[in-house]
Structure formats: C-alpha cells, structure tokens
Image (tube, grey):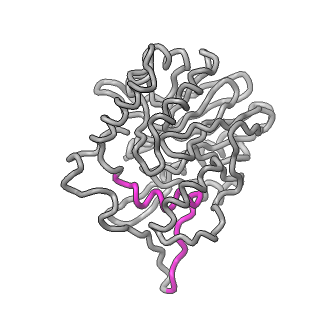
Amino acid sequence: MTSLPLPTSTGATATVQPFHDSGTGTVSYVVWDHATRQAAVIDPVLDYDPDAGRTHDASARLLLDYLQAERLRVEWILETHAHADHLSAARHIQAATGGKVAIGAAIRTVQRTFGPLFGMEPTQDDGFDHLFEDGEAFRIGATGAQAIGVPGHTPADMAYRIDGAVFVGDTLFLPDVGTARADFPGGDAAALYRSIQRLLALPGDTRMFVCHDYPPEGRAPRCETTVDEQRRSNIHVGGQAGERAFVALRQARDATLAVPRLLLPSIQVNVRGGRLPEPGPEGIAYLRIPLNVFGRADALPATAAAP
C-alpha cells in the first residue's frame, strides 16, 4: 500500500496539496498560507498493520517531507471526525512540527459512546488541543477559515472552509461515489442530509475536497470537485433529491455495508486525538479488541464496501 501526492490546487491566498493513501482510500491535505507559510494538516494517516500489530509512518512521512521542502510551519492539525478506517497521525505530526490538534466539540459525544467499550475513564481529558464550535472562525497564517458543523456520518463531523474551498471529511464523496454511511453509533441519515444541504448552499464555485475516494473501475483516485458539480450530479443528492428519498436510500445502502476493517483499533486511538495507548508495566502498549459487539460475522457481507 502506498501514499502518493495528488495534483496541487492553488487559491487566492493558500495552496492545497493532497496526499492519497491507497490502503485506506484516505486523502490527507496540507493547506498553507502564501503570505506567512503557516500551514494546516488535515486528516493525516498513521499506517497500521493489524496482522502484525505494528504502526509505521510512511504516509505521515510524505506530509512531513513536503512540509520541510516547502519550509512550512504547522499551525493546525485538523481532524474532520474520529475516523473508523485508519489511525490518525495527528500526534506523530505534532511531535515533529508542533501545531494544535483540533476537532469539532461534539467529539465529546463520540467519546461518551465509545469510552466504556474501550475502558476509557470519563474523567480523562478530551485528548485534543482545541475543540471547534459550529461557525467558529480561525486563521491559518493570514488566511481566514471557518469550522462548519456537519453531523450525520458521526455526531462530531466538522467541515473546514478555507480560501474558497471546503474540506468536507466523509460527509460527501465525489459525485460518482455519493455520500457517507450514517449507521455508526450516533450517526443519522436525516442529519447527514441536512448537513449536505448546508454544504450545497455554499457558492457554486467553492472547491470541495473529500476525505476518501472509492473510484469506479477505470477512474484514477481524485479528491476535488465543486459545489456546483455536486448539486448537478452527485448520485445520492444531486438534482432534486429530497430528504425522505435520501434517508431511505442511505439506510438501505448502509444495511449492506461491512464493519470497517480497522474500526476497533482506529476509534480507540482517534477519539483521543491520535494518542496511542500508554505502555503497561511491562513496557508494551495494547489496543483493546472487544468481542461480539458489532454484529455477527455471518451477517456481514463477504467484503467491505465503500461507505
């Protein structure tokens, strides 16, 4: 599995450099301000081999090499949500570059849901350096940015609007792929529809960057579209698709999807801001894998499908 840069996108005040991780289909981003060379890293991936129980930093290293080559200073490490299909490299990036690890404030809801499953004490800190409220403004160097709450896929999904672009996490995919699943604990297809409508109300020429791509056969991975393109041709919400029809479609689709392969390792790391478990007395760190919690093996499809 490899991570590769995708084409650079340049706006009025900031440059967007995407990186696609073929192992998980995740797209991570470095967004940097031209005037100050301050940067935000969005949704970085820490590679994890579940068979060997080993992490490595090949994907994160690509981002770090780019940051160094462009002489960028990291101000923010932004998570769009607590991912269920890869471990976050937020703390790995932070250890090398500094910057604040941030996510939407509704992550507390996700922590309350999953904390007992993984033996996390409710008195522990939230694991993040900053929690964004819906509509909160912030800056990346001289470039203005805004956090936009987009619950539905999970309760804590947050989009980030930066320099004529919006980074939507798993709320929307490219038009020929559709939308994210809404069947995780706390997910809500109706809320997802309303969040999508909020994004589609942005100016039509807004560049939209997705967190995953699951390309149909014959198409190379991509990560960028526009609000206008989504309005016209998204296979789940384009045209005149209404909420009731979308919810029915989404629920029927979700009923066919397998549990993500890395759900259990990912969630327990990602709800803590990418912090790996502390080593025990013997000096070894452990992930917890609860048994028989997420459905029956004989009830799952033979292969995992795209969300």
Q: Position of residue 22 (x, y in %)?
A: 39, 41
Magenta stretch encompasses residue 275: yes
Q: Position of residue 124 (x, y in %)?
A: 63, 69
Prevalent SS, magenta region: loop
Q: Position of residue 234 (x, y in %)?
A: 43, 21
Q: Is residue 191 left or right of residue 147?
A: left
Residue at 51% from the left image edge and 81% from the top image edge: 280
Residue at 47% from the left image edge and 13% from the top image edge: 232
Magenta stretch encompasses residue 243: no
- The image shows residue 293, relative to residue 214, as above or below, that is below
Residue at 81% from the left image edge and 34% from the top image edge: 142
Mark count: 0
Q: Residue furthest bottom?
A: 281
- The image shows residue 68, relative to residue 284, as above or below, that is above
Q: Nearer the viewer, residue 150 or 86?
A: 150
- The image shows residue 136, relative to residue 264, as above or below, that is above
Residue 35 quadrant: top right
Q: Nearer the viewer, residue 138 or 120?
A: 120
Q: Residue furthest front?
A: 244
Residue at 37% from the left image edge and 67% from the top image edge: 289
Q: Position of residue 272 (x, y in %)?
A: 57, 61
Where the C terminus falls, by quadrant? top left
Write down the region rendered in magenta. Answer: 261-281
